[in-house]
Image: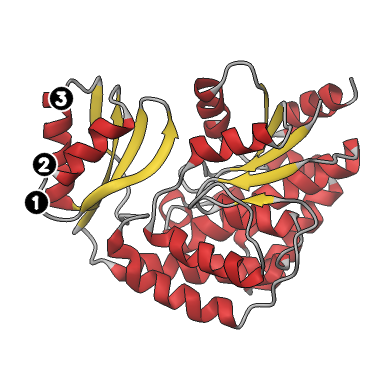
């Protein structure tokens, strides 16, 4: 089977993640040690021991999830000699994909996403932003709802058919929730996040990120990376930077990314990261894809066996 790798973003973290893999696999332990050295604090202890509210801070969650994704991908590559056709990530996971494809170094990416998290948190005062999941409406209906509401609210994540996350100003998102229910949404519910990611409220964060990217060395990818904003590979390194800047304030087009991976020949996808969230979305996008998730030692062993067949 032709292989594609996908990497999750925020929301999949939990205290204790990768504890069993760190204990059993030296390559995982070394990757987490490398992350600690690059960041100047022990993100690995935060992953293992928490506390949960500190791990859940955006500036900590982002490097923790990137470190977890790279540790898992390295372990799988070592154990099974993976040769993916293409890679992609969901929001923050795009940076993990770029590290795996050797576009940026592990250390640079860790420092960059920590800054990204801080900039996103600083862009909007706490309590003023909101995100919500809308289930059971098609994309066009949700876009129409957002257009009809006064204030800033827009689609943030096109996650799967009938599952879109919206983002923006708290009051506008709340109005969009009620309007979605009136349109017949099966569910419309706020999400427990304070940062209205992938909305125009993140433009100040995008500017901070753009300046940081100018000082970050990028290299041509060794594997095609499909970007969130358009589900296309960057045409050059400047285009890659532009897509990363745009991504902060524009929607994650995850459905399109999965379709693009299929178009490149991928028939099996492996999610590298805790939680298994992306695996669930992929199954809703296309049940015909062979979907595997690797987030702990048990699932790692299952994936290695599957790759051997």
- Residue 53, compared with residue 284, is above or below; it is below
Q: Which residue is mark 2?
A: 175
Foreground residue among 132 and 47: 132
Crowding near the residue tagged with mark 3, few <14, some 14–19, many ≥20 C-alpha atoms within 10 Å: some
Mark 3: secondary structure: helix
Give the side of residue 230 with respect to residue 149, left or right.
right
Crowding near the residue tagged with mark 1, few <14, some 14–19, many ≥20 C-alpha atoms within 10 Å: few
Q: Image quarter for residue 175?
A: top left
Distance CA(mark 2)–CA(mark 3)? 12 Å
Mark 2: secondary structure: helix
Mark 1: secondary structure: loop
- Residue 252, compared with residue 103, is above or below; it is above
Residue 102 % position (x, y): 76, 61
Query: Which labelled disc corresponds to residue 183?
Result: 3
Distance CA(mark 1)–CA(mark 2)? 8 Å
Q: Which residue is mark 1?
A: 150
Residue 80 % position (x, y): 89, 35
Choose the circle earlier in sequence order: 3 or 1.
Answer: 1
Foreground residue among 256 and 291: 256
Quarter of the N terminus within the rendering: top right
For the point 67% across and 67% down, the residue is 236
Residues tagged 3 and 1 counted as in contact (Cβ below 8 A): no
């Amino acid at each position: 089977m032709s292989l594609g790798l996908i990497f999750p973003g925020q929301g999949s973290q939990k205290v204790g993640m990768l504890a069993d893999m760190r204990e059993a696999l030296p390559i995982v332990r070394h990757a987490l040690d490398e992350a600690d050295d690059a960041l100047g604090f022990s993100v690995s202890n935060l992953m293992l021991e928490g506390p949960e509210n500190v791990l859940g801070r955006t500036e900590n969650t982002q490097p923790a999830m990137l470190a977890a994704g790279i540790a898992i991908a390295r372990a799988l590559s070592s154990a099974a000699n993976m040769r993916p056709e293409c890679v992609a990530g969901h929001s923050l996971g795009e940076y993990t994909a770029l590290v795996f494809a050797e576009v940026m170094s592990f250390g640079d990416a860790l420092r960059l996403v920590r800054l990204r998290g801080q900039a996103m948190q600083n862009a909007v005062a706490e309590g003023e932003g909101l995100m919500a999941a809308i289930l059971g409406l098609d994309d066009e209906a949700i876009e129409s709802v957002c257009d009809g509401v006064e204030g800033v609210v827009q689609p943030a994540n096109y996650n799967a058919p009938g599952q879109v996350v919206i983002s923006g100003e708290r009051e506008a998102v709340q109005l969009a929730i009620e309007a979605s229910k009136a349109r017949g949404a099966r569910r419309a519910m706020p999400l427990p996040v304070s940062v209205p990611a992938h909305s125009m409220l993140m433009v100040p964060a995008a500017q901070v990120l753009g300046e940081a990217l100018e000082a970050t060395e990028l290299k041509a990818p060794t594997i095609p990376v499909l970007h969130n904003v358009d589900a296309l590979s960057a045409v050059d390194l400047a285009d890659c930077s532009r897509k990363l800047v745009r991504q902060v304030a524009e929607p994650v087009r995850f459905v399109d990314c999965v379709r693009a991976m299929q178009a490149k020949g991928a028939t099996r996808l492996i999610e590298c990261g805790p939680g298994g969230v992306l695996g669930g979305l992929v199954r809703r996008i296309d049940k015909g894809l062979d979907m595997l998730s690797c987030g702990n030692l048990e699932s790692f062993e299952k994936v290695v066996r599957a790759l051997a067949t």
